[in-house]
Amino acid sequence: MGHIKSNCFIMLSVQKQLIEALKNGLFSLFEIQSNDLVLQETKKEFEGTYTFVVFPYTKQAGLAPAAIAEKLGQYVKENYAGIKKFQVVQGFLNFSFSDEVWIEALHKIVQGSQKISLDKKGEKILIEYSSPNTNKPLHLGHLRNNFLGFSVAKILDAAGYEVIKTNLVNDRGIHICKSMLAYQLKGQGETPAISGMKGDHLVGKYYVAFDQLYKEEIAELTQQGIDLEKAKKEAPILLKAQDMLLAWENGDPEVMKLWETMNTWVFAGFEKSYAQMGVSFDKIYRESNTYLLGKKLVDEGLKEGVFYQKEDQSVWINLEEEGLDEKLVLRKDGTSVYITQDMGTAQLKFEDFGAKKSIYVVGNEQDYHFEVLFHILKKLNKPYSHGNFHLSYGMVDLPTGKMKSREGTVVDADDLMAEMVQTAKERTMELGKTDGFTEEASNELYQQLGMGALKYFLLKVDPKKRMMFNPLESIDFQGNTGPFIQYTYARICSITRKARELGIDLRDAHANGIELTVTEVDLIYILGQYKSIIESAAEAFSPSLIAMYAYDVAKQFNKLYNELNILKEEDENKRNIRLTLADITGKTIQHAFSLLGIVSPNKM
RNA sequence: GGUUCCGUAGCUCAGUUGGAUAGAGCAACUGCCUUCUAAGCAGUAGGUCUUUGGUUCGAAUCCAAACGGAAUCACCA
């Protein structure tokens, strides 16, 4: 199994003492000096918490592995009071701790639960996520992006950073003009109000319409005997779109007016989607505002000799030393490209917030782009150029392959979220869980469960990896899912609610001389890891670590719930220990889920 | 073609500096609700960790090659 996190706060002193004892044992028994002793978690099928592997010492000790383990175990048990027993299996030496150690650990967890978040680091960190285009509605890929970005922001906040959430809206460029042009041609004054469509969907409709018109024209041209490649470049509607982009850059009043109108529609639509997703931003940037600043940076770089101009006036940077190519940073006609805008945005964000660390939550298809961007910022010697990180997440694949908006193979974000809430409603009603709920409370619960299932589904997978979504199979509500963990939380709430009704005060829980079961010890052990899990998740920018942890916690608690009585336990001390465990388990789940942006209902 | 990433159960995924009989969930099959919420628990079955070589006490993990898949290498964003 895995190695022990060196920063597992709760068990830290216990681990240190054990390692110290092992070190001393190795020296006094075998005269082996070793400074890097590593413990491992004992595998489930064996008794114990920590395992020490002695295979590496067989040569030096001149004994068989089992013999070394036996002697070492004996030594440690005699010299460290916290050890209850040790067992030797081949070259593996397994240690179990006394119940006192575990009770003490539980007390520390209870004390620490007053403030679960880690200490402030006094450091600002920017996170940019979402980054939609204003020519079409959001899809499944955006959901992964938004949930990831929001969750990572929460995790970093919990890890002590001052987090600033930004969203860079891509609201300019040829693709935006395409939907505008199609609207001009076919729109006939349609508005979201008239059509009853959400603004982003309405605009998206015209983006698709453009593509149809474009394809028709290409077909026509090729029938006239024109080469396909040529037809693609010279279709009249495409040329018109290009003209429109020029008109936009020149501030043509009519084009600007249409652009602003359609933007307003899209933003109104996005706002609804973001509200449903439960994500938010501290500041929204628009590329239409940042691309000009990017051009300024190009001028600076030219003066400093970082960039150079070719004969046709286009501006370039040479990144061959970095193992990359020459890259264009400004077109020959002086208009900016993608990277120019990103340079401008980076500068603007730094001027606004002064953060030297910055995370970009963007799909891995743009790995190369960000590599280039970060190199450019370094060459420009920007103060924020060394804290950039591209959180490159994998695509969400469908069984049919990659999603493509133009081919109609996208899973729409709004549709999917609505479906999830509907499924949650059906499942909940089948189980009769909302009997006695008000309608308002029921609907709130369906929201929480549907979104919980969806968010957990997308966040439990390692962000870096591509993942599969099959629209024909609904997302589960059982097993390793959001609702399972939410259910465990609601179950715990039910217990603590009843405990309060019975007037049980946990503060006077005394636990002297209590015998714990393996299940209780395992739960205490898992609960003690939470803070170090937060730290790992923050370091790796990985909500999936939090998700998997929450699942482990819930699973272990349900095991305990089925094996042991809690409220009905007659021994008051045992009952109180279990109640304390239940309470801390609930708090841990709730906190972990809040880091994923998932609400934990206290009744379901 | 260059670069980067990936290949683990029928399906979706874990597996953190190399460690014990490779783990979960779903799907399938067995049990458990007059007792704290059965969206739960316990169990059965399911694997040549793509293949082949190497490194060593020991490899899903490290190295090399082959096979299969993906992304990217735009004066698109």
Image (cartoon, helix red, strand yellow):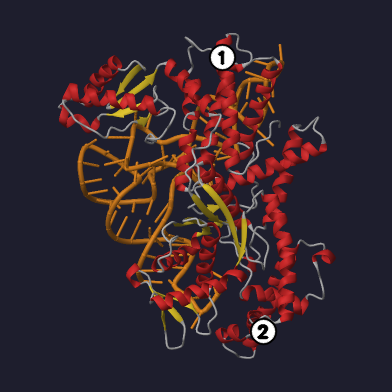
Identify whether A469 is placed above or below A501. Answer: below
Q: Quadrant of the C terminus of chain A?
A: top right
Identify whether A207 is placed above or below B34. Answer: below
Answer yes or no: are tags 2 and 1 on the same subunit. yes
Picture coordinates of residue A525 (x, y %)?
46, 26
Pick whichever, A496 or B12, lies toward us.
A496
Mark 1, Cα crowd under 10 Å, few <14 / some 14-19 / many 20+, is: some
Picture coordinates of residue A354 (x, y %)?
51, 57
At 52% from the left and 44% from the top, the residue drawn is: A544
Q: Quadrant of the N terminus of chain A?
A: top left
Picture coordinates of residue B55 (x, y %)?
21, 46
Picture coordinates of residue B44 (x, y %)?
50, 29
Mark-to-mark CA distance, 2 and 1: 77 Å
Q: Which label belongs to residue A2? A: none
Q: In this figure, which residue is indicated by the disc labeled 1? A: A509
User: Subunit of mark 2?
Assistant: A
Frontmost of labels 2 and 1 is: 1
> Which amino acid is tagged 1?
Ala
Identify whether B54 is placed above or below A429. Answer: below
Q: In this figure, which residue is indicated by the disc labeled 2? A: A240
At 79% from the left and 62% from the top, the residue drawn is: A197
Residue A29 left/right relative to A490: left
**Local secondary structure at mark 1:** loop
**Local secondary structure at mark 2:** helix
